[in-house]
Image: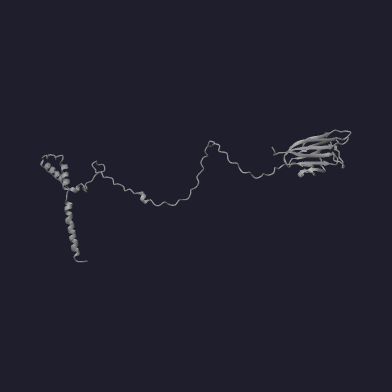
Amino acid sequence: MDARTPGLLLGCCLLLIFACVPVLGRVPRGQQTQQEHEVTQGDAKAEGTKEPPPPRDHAKRAEEEHEKYNPHQAEEPPASRCFRCCDPSAPVYQPVPVPQINITILKGEKGDRGDRGLQGKYGKTGSAGARGHIGPKGQKGSVGAPGDRCKSHYAAFSVGRKKPLHSNAYYQTVIFDTEFVNLYGHFNMFTGKFYCYVPGIYFFSLNVHTWNQKETYLHIMRNGEEAVILYAQVSDRSIMQSQSLMLELREQDEVWVRLFKGERENAIFSDEFDTYITFSGYLVKHAAEP
């Protein structure tokens, strides 16, 4: 370190002291006047004399004179003077304006379109609107393709028996041995029954030849129930007997001829040369037709 440095530091300190002493010893003019007034009052009390009260505008004049000789007083208040928030004479400070930001300057470029959201719930169904006006007649359409051929339904059979049959202790189904017509095989020659595959209304006819001095007693059956009877009393001579009826059948219904059991002597006649017993049936109207 240079030898002149301590001397320079000491000189700077002395300059600071001389500069601060007048400022620290300075008393505001208002406070100086007040102190002088207090000293005067104290001296008057000590002497036992009354000092006349200071004029009313004395303080005001002192402030005007102070402002006159101190032009910077209006710019900044004395640093030693304090105010309370509830004091009505406290200075009113103007609000500092808040700076406004122009958002349009900060606005960026338009972004990409986002993904489509989920579909919302369906709203309530509204009421039906009024019926609209009838529109104009349209043009005639083109000719359509030809339709299918009208389907007809058929069912028919006709069978016969060349052997006689006598009654016994139980019911017997009449079995036929001659087939005249059996369309689509709906009549079963082994069971002696007609099975309905085409529902509708059918016509049935039964023809038999009676036996001399014997009774003739048969039934046309439908699904195990007696539909009609064919009966002939005992006679000295044999004759031809017939029975016919119409039945409304459903699919899988069964129709056949049954000989009554032997409570009385019961028989039907036929021989191998001629067919005396016949059973026939055919469809009159299909169930689906109007």
Position of the C terminus by quadrant = top right
In the image, taking residue 229 as reference, residue 70 lies left or right, namely: left
- Looking at the image, residue 247 lies above or below residue 21: above
Total numbered circles: 0
Position of the N terminus by quadrant = bottom left
Q: Quadrant of the rendered structure where residue 270 is?
A: top right
Q: How is the image coloured?
A: one colour
* Residue 122 % position (x, y): 51, 42
Q: Nearer the viewer, residue 43 or 232?
A: 232
* Residue 239 % position (x, y): 86, 35
* Residue 267 % position (x, y): 85, 37
Q: Nearer the viewer, residue 13 or 92?
A: 92
Q: Nearer the viewer, residue 141 or 285?
A: 141
Q: In the image as oriented, which residue stretches furthest toward the right?
A: 236
In the image, taking residue 202 as reference, residue 2 lies left or right, namely: left
Residue drawn at point x = 17 percent, y = 55 percent: 19
Residue 261 visible in this rendered orientation of the protein: no
